[in-house]
């Protein structure tokens, strides 16, 4: 094994933080020995409650039934806004940088509170109330945060759909959550291009008869189709609404939002997060992981369409009274210096992004980084996929100039917040390792039979005890929740990831062990892409696997068998790609399509994906046992047909 480089905690951070290595150990120890006492204290410190809880945490992973702070009452928008007004009414809550350099806005806590209250009244005037679902399909603009917090204010449940998803994907999500109202923009802007959000909504709604209202943010102000009686401009509605809207008193276990995420099988599932535990976990992790200090500008580049945008652009930072930066554009527009220039412009202290961004910018050369001085940076974070040591080192050496700890944070949509991560003042760093568990998190490594492995070990990563940010169910499908996460290894939460634990107790995430792939930090189910491909009349069968990709982390490799009378051609490939983009979105575009006369199957007809993964990765000498295949010659055919 390669020798690992260990970077000690920078002396100035150790000297100025409360959570040193010793304090981490003490707090971690307490958090797992006395989780109720531990979380109760933090709940008092981080969140304002209207009424106390009866029980801090109560859970079993069999049913499963998970509750935190049940009986307690609170409102998330009150916690993110109202309670800050006295001290921070004039402080910037949201800094917005548009796709076009020079496009910028700033909202103070006072202004954000005003918009949220007004928009909450707009929602109410359209009949939206507690427990109703609202679909949000917006670009990265402040109205996204306004819409989220307005839902939270009146107890409506938001379901945000990433603006990169197609109208088909949007339709599926609107129908599954039974949304009656959609918030969208005329268009989004990314890298100088326009994203036709309203157009996609119109297309989706032709199949969603229950949606009565569409509130449209005028963002690019270019013409859009309009359905009278259904569509209404966001700004007109907000201006005419009252700024007075008392927050709804919510129970800690009332749902806060639904967020769809991909799994091994079937359509994406609506993961449900609830009010009290989620907010607490987002706030505590935001504070401790990033060592957030009052007055600092904090920037997470994630889109609000993903969990990272929920927890670390909006809920965690605003609950902590932070200044959070929202960026609409892409890292390479107009030049690959954009991110670093934004850091200088707003004097960003904490910067949190994805490995795919780091790898892409690394590939374009360090000169772009040097165009900005980046002196304000103190902390760097990474999330969404494994960060390879080479990218880690570049981030650390070149972007942070060896001054800023790089925090590789492992977590998932289902975990609500960061689970395995270094803490800046407490954790010596090893490039490529997410290091140690956050407070209250009990990771375990299991072998294939579900036995818990001790000491240094490699296997499947599971979590042995509940934490406040844990998802509670899959929307209207609790069985699926149980089957996906709790059935395979009874009594534990199954993450779907593999991991190795080293002799220092550090965790190294090795990637998904199921049929989920991670493309540029976007989580996709191979089954979804396969069903999009097989919708085409010419396709008899398709198998999709991930393969190592220099920039995206994983690329999408599709093995496709055509029906007897279809002829393979480049045009047909283009049609298939178009079909996937229509069904899911551009993020699911296959990088490679290989025609194959047949797929390798077992005698019982199961596709041997293990073999396809090896072929896609060019691990041809490691195909393993092919003797159980119905027709081993198929493998030879596929290897011969592999595109150069
Ligand atoms: O495979 C892991 C990978 O992303 C998956 C979760 O994806 P999603 O629910 O979309 O949430 C992404 C943002 C939290 C995980 O199962 N993943 C996430 N962070 C890391 C990671 N893999 C390795 N290292 C990470 N730091």
Image: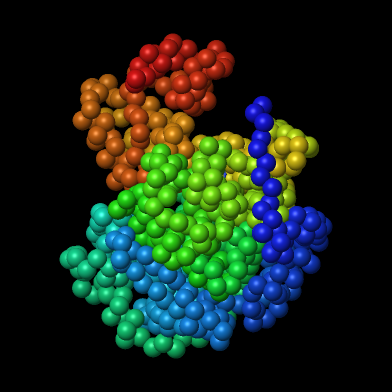
Q: Is residue 250 left or right of residue 500?
A: left
**Residue at 26% across / 55% down in the picture?**
192
Residue 436 vertical placement versus 210 (above, below)? above
**Residue at 39% across / 52% down in the picture?**
371
Residue 339 vertical placement versus 110 (above, below)? above
Q: Is residue 334 visible?
A: yes
Q: Quadrant of the C terminus?
A: top left
**Residue at 52% across / 25% down in the picture?**
610
Residue toward you, 58 or 342: 342
The x and y percentages for residue 515 are 51, 36
Q: How is the image coloured?
A: rainbow
Residue toward you, 372 or 407: 372
Residue toward you, 263 or 564: 263
The x and y percentages for residue 301 are 45, 57
Residue 124 vertical placement versus 622 (above, below)? below
Residue 364 vertical placement versus 225 (above, below)? above
The x and y percentages for residue 321 are 56, 74
Which corner quadrant of the image does residue 195 belong to? bottom left
Which corner quadrant of the image does residue 4 belong to? top right
The x and y percentages for residue 258 are 49, 61
**Residue at 63% across / 67% down in the picture?**
280
Q: How many marks?
A: 0
């Amino acid at each position: 094994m390669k020798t690992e480089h260990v970077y000690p905690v920078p002396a100035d951070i150790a000297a100025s933080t409360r959570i040193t290595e010793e304090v981490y150990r003490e707090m971690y120890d307490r958090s797992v020995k006395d989780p109720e006492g531990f979380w109760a204290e933090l709940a008092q410190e981080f969140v304002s409650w209207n009424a106390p809880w009866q029980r801090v945490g109560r859970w079993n992973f069999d049913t499963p039934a998970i509750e935190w702070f049940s009986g307690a009452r609170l409102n998330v928008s009150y916690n993110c806004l109202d309670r800050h007004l006295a001290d921070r009414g004039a402080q910037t809550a949201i800094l917005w940088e548009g796709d076009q350099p020079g496009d910028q806005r700033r909202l103070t806590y006072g202004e954000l509170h005003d918009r949220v209250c007004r928009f909450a009244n707009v929602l109410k005037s359209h009949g939206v109330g507690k427990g109703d679902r609202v679909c949000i399909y917006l670009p990265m603009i402040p109205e996204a945060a306004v819409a989220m917090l307005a839902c939270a204010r009146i107890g409506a449940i938001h379901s945000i759909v990433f603006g990169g998803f197609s109208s088909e994907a949007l339709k599926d999500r609107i129908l599954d959550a039974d949304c009656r109202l959609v918030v969208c923009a005329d268009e989004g802007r990314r890298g100088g291009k326009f994203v036709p959000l309203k157009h996609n909504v119109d297309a989706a709604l032709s199949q969603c008869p229950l949606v009565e209202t569409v509130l449209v943010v005028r963002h690019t102000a270019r013409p859009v189709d309009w359905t009278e009686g259904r569509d209404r401009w966001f700004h007109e509605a907000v201006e005419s609404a009252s700024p007075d809207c008392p927050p709804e008193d919510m129970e800690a276990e009332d749902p806060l939002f639904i967020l769809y995420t991909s799994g091994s099988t079937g359509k994406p599932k609506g993961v449900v997060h609830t009010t009290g535990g989620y907010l607490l976990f987002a706030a505590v992790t935001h504070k401790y992981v990033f060592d957030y200090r009052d007055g600092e500008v904090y920037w997470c580049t994630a889109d609000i369409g993903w969990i990272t945008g929920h927890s670390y652009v909006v809920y965690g930072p605003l609950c902590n009274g932070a200044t959070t930066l929202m960026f609409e554009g892409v890292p390479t527009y107009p030049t690959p210096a954009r991110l670093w220039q934004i850091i200088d412009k707003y004097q960003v202290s904490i910067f949190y992004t994805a490995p795919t961004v780091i790898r892409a910018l690394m590939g374009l050369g360090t000169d772009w980084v040097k165009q900005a001085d980046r002196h304000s940076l103190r902390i760097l974070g990474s999330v969404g996929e494994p960060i390879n040591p080479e990218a880690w080192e570049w981030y650390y050496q070149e972007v942070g100039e060896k001054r800023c700890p790089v925090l590789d944070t492992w977590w998932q949509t289902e975990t609500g917040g960061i689970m395995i991560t270094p803490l800046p003042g407490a954790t010596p760093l090893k490039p490529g390792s997410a290091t140690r568990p956050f407070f209250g998190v009990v990771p375990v490594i299991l072998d294939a039979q579900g036995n818990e492995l001790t000491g240094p070990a490699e296997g499947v990563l599971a979590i042995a005890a509940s934490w406040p940010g844990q998802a509670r169910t899959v929307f209207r499908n609790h069985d699926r929740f149980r089957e996906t996460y709790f059935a395979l290894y009874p009594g534990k939460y199954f993450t779907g990831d593999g991991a190795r634990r080293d002799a220092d107790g550090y965790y190294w995430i090795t990637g998904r062990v199921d049929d989920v792939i991670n493309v540029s930090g976007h989580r996709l189910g191979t089954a979804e892409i396969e069903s999009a491909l097989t919708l085409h009349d010419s396709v008899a069968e398709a198998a999709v696997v991930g393969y190592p990709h220099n920039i995206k982390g994983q690329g999408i490799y599709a093995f496709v068998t055509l029906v007897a009378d279809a002829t393979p051609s480049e045009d047909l490939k283009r049609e298939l790609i178009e079909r996937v983009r229509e069904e899911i979105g551009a993020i699911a575009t296959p990088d490679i399509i290989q025609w194959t006369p047949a797929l390798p199957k077992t005698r019982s007809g199961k596709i041997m994906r293990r073999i396809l993964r090896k072929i896609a990765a060019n691990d041809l000498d490691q195909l393993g046992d092919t003797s159980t295949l119905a027709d081993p010659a198929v493998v030879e055919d596929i290897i011969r047909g592999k595109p150069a």
